[in-house]
Image: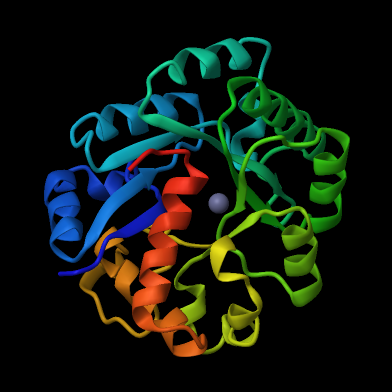
């Protein structure tokens, strides 16, 4: 496989990977997905993500943070705990963090408070941010204007409209695309947006075990990093650059985003 793909977001701490984590990673490597970033959704989960990354330190990295769904758990000790976990050099980003007003599993005010604190922390630790936004674009932008990130940011699992896309690009954010782009219904509006994203701002991610590309028929419906190639194929189809150029640039972008020397 000539590929050197980077899955910038996979929830490999999820219980569905408990019994075959090693095989999942090895299968990904055999399909050309050489690097995976394991995302943390709260602090115990971020520790778990780091512990898993340590099993394949040449291929795996992790994030540390509190997902907006769990923002109610953000408290006066959280910042210290995040700083502690981030001491390990395999932790390459702060996140997931952001706002999710779709499900509102956590109080809106707590989400905003946690998000602002995460931006401050990312700036002080000089770590990029892995951002989640759902049904909260306006407030999300407000937070980013209140506390300005001085580090790289990716809006992961981008599913928004053209206006939102351009507002992120104006901030020089990276755009993370998932298997949504392979969904002929839910992802239909993304088809015309894919070519509008500057190639040097594009990143790809599976968000495993969620968002299995719709075209795949997989028993159990569990998504895995090895299916990143489906997202890649869709992007190649919708863009004018050559396959090689796209693969090279996606790889370069990923390492640049996480500040990893190759
Ligand atoms: Zn997310």
Q: How is the image coloured?
A: rainbow
Residue 210 seen by the camera = no
Quadrant including the N terminus: bottom left
Rendering coords of residue 202 (x, y %): 54, 64
Whether residue 214 is situated above or below residue 111 in the rendered picture: below
Residue at the (43%, 29%) spot, across then down: 46
Of residue 193 and residue 103, the one placed in the foreground of this image is 193
Whether residue 258 is situated above or below residue 101 in the rendered picture: above
- Tell me which corner region of the image, top left, top right, bottom left or bottom right, holds residue 225: bottom left
Rendering coords of residue 237 (x, y %): 44, 89
Rendering coords of residue 61 (x, y %): 35, 37
| Number of numbered tags placed on the structure image | 0
Residue at the (51%, 85%) spot, across then down: 239
Q: State left or right for residue 60 relative to residue 19.
A: right
Residue 76 seen by the camera = yes
Residue at the (63%, 72%) spot, across then down: 197
Of residue 93 and residue 187, the one placed in the foreground of this image is 93
Rendering coords of residue 148 (x, y %): 80, 36
- Tell me which corner region of the image, top left, top right, bottom left or bottom right, holds residue 106: top right
Quadrant including the C terminus: top left
Q: State left or right for residue 101 relative to residue 199.
A: right
Of residue 109 and residue 189, the one placed in the foreground of this image is 189
Whether residue 16 is situated above or below residue 200 in the rendered picture: above
């Amino acid at each position: 496989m000539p590929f050197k793909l980077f899955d910038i977001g996979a929830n490999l701490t999820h219980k569905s990977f408990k019994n075959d984590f090693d095989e999942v990673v090895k299968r990904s490597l055999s399909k050309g997905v050489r690097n995976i970033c394991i995302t943390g959704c709260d602090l115990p989960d971020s520790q778990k993500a780091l512990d898993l990354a340590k099993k394949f330190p040449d291929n795996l990295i992790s994030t540390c943070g509190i997902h907006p769904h769990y923002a109610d758990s953000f408290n006066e000790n959280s910042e210290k705990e995040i700083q502690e976990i981030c001491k390990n050099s395999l932790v390459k980003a702060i996140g997931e963090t952001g706002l999710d007003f779709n499900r509102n599993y956590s109080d809106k005010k707590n989400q905003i408070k946690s998000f602002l604190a995460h931006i401050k922390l990312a700036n002080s630790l000089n770590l990029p941010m892995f951002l989640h936004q759902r049904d909260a674009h306006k407030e999300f932008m407000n937070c980013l204007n209140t506390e300005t990130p001085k580090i790289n940011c990716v809006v992961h699992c981008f599913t928004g409209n053209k206006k939102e896309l351009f507002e992120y690009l104006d901030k020089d954010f990276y755009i993370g695309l998932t298997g949504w782009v392979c969904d002929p219904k839910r992802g239909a509006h993304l088809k015309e947006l894919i070519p509008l994203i500057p190639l040097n701002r594009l990143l790809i991610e599976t968000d495993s075990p969620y968002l299995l590309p719709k075209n795949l028929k997989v028993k159990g419906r569990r998504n895995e990093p090895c299916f990143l190639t489906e997202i890649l194929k869709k992007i190649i189809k919708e863009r004018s650059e050559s396959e090689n150029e796209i693969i090279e640039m996606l790889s370069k972008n990923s390492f640049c985003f996480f500040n990893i020397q190759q």
